[in-house]
Image (tube, grey):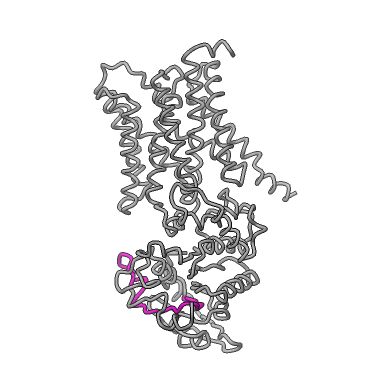
Amino acid sequence: MSDILQYGFMQRALIAGAVIGVICAVVGVYVVLRGMAFIGAGIAHASFGGVALGVLLGINPVVAALVFCLIIAWGIGILARKGEVREDISIGVFFAATMALGILVIGLTKGYQVDLFGYLFGSILAVTPQDLWISLILGAVVLSVVGLFFKDLLFITFDSEMAEVAGLPAERLHFVLLGLISLTVVLSMKVVGIILVSALIITPAAAAYQLTEDFRKMMALAVLIGVLAATLGLLLSYWLNTASGATIVLLATFFFLASVALSPRRLRWFFKAR
Amino acid sequence: MSETMAEAKPIIELEDISVTYQSHVALNNINLGVPAGSFLAVVGPNGSGKTTLLKTILGTIRPSRGTVRVFGRPPWDLGEERRRIGYVPQAMSVDLRFPIRAGEVVLMGRYGRIGLMRRPSSTDREAALQAMQRVGITDLANEPIGRLSGGQRQRVFVARALANDPDLLLLDEPTTGVDIATSGSFYDLLYKLHKEGLTVVVVSHDMGVVANYADTVACINQCMVVHGRPGEVATGEVLACMYGPRAAFLDHGPIPHMVVPEHETLDTEKDKNE
């Protein structure tokens, strides 16, 4: 155990994994409770187009992906707000379109030797010191925004209509959440991979949802499950020589299934039925 | 508010209000004045525009024609005075599995007043506690909302509205899905609040119950059918206008009962809100 921690890449990956576990879980609580799972997946796939454009234009792929995700996320939000295109429809359109754009752009940049599999499926070897710093800074931004707007985000998540009636800017807070999802996707994609990042956002929160009826406890449990899945998943992927993102997500899924089996609600029902 | 003030100026004034969704007319030429301190029941069949009327008073729907004034101003332009309107939405509008406790839901009533990014103060907590005392649910503060009965949950939502110390309370079908005894004690509570000086406007499709409590009944079916004291409005003519010409009435007891031979006249109505 201690020997693998001597590798710089492993230290970076584990720190990045812990940060990702926390951020994905915190944002995931809102995504799960607001029923935004599909837009989370849509934003994650949009980041691929951003990465590819970044490579083509010689911009840092993480920065390019962030800008691209924000444009797509808020664009979908604006279309849905004006009632012109239903949200799930525009997600369905942009989900595939941004992936297609990414694939097209990669075809144009054949000369580049970029580990695209690192972005698509996650790789512990892919985390550079610069990536780690970007993850830490973006993670700090996400946590500060959640901390500042904690009660307001809770209100729009629980009852958006009442929040609006009470005079809170429910719509703008929804856009803040879309921005937080974009940041979370981008800071996670190096370790978990674009294809699987939405699972790491949703699964720990979904597991925590099974275990408690208190909002703060749900967030704390989601963070615990997210950090365990990300760090243990990284170590497992190192030992088993498997893709890090897939290992992390499958471990999180295992935690989710265990939570469903051990859910107090379900156990209560089970014993009542006896 | 004194009686003379109430007579001088109603706190809700609707003049020639029409609301149209695309080509569907939800409300047609409604005139209504609600004096301070009154208890108004708005009744009508499904799809008659009851909820639309409530949301017009609330200011979340703007009429396509006519003028609305609440406390002397358009309800979307009330600014700080908006707090004087308390709103209890339809029971089914929230996710009952949301991990949140009753006390926190009540405290949410203060979130708009507290403002973005600020934390609730001891004054806010005190106001929430007082609101829970007024509706008799202090012992439920730590219960997750999913474990409350339908009647208890509605009291939580009334307490949330009361936490802002409003002068006007709007309720949308507050007793849908609860049994008759619970519904009765809920209306007892509304009657108590009305006696404490609150102006109450409750939307219901259950004329039989609300007529026992309200001092004024407004029957609407797109247009205003009748507006007056409960004894005056429960006539065959009015019910025929509301429920179709083939409805028959059994006049025994204070409220006439109704027998409707065929339901297709009712079923052709589509209610957007249910």
List x then y, in percent, for residue B12: 41, 75
Which segment did they paint magenta? B18-44
Q: Nearer the viewer, residue B120 or B239?
A: B120
Q: Residue furthest right?
A: A274
Q: Nearer the viewer, residue B243 or B93?
A: B93
Residue drawn at 42 percent across, 75 percent down: B11
Q: Is residue A244 left or right of residue B31?
A: right
Q: Quadrant of residue A222?
A: top right
Q: Nearer the viewer, residue B199 or A251?
A: B199
List x then y, in percent, for residue B108: 52, 55
Dominant secondary structure of the residues highlighted in magenta in the image = strand
Q: Does B259 lie within the magenta span?
A: no
Residue drawn at 58 percent across, 81 percent down: B212
Work out whether A40 lies above or below A80: above
List x then y, in percent, for residue B16: 32, 77
Q: Quadrant of residue A191?
A: top left
Number of dots carrying numbers: 0
Q: Does B33 lie within the magenta span?
A: yes
List x then y, in percent, for residue B227: 44, 83
Whether residue B90 can be seen here? no
Work out whether B36 lies above or below A187: below
Whether residue B218 can be seen here? yes
Residue drawn at 66 percent across, 39 percent down: A262
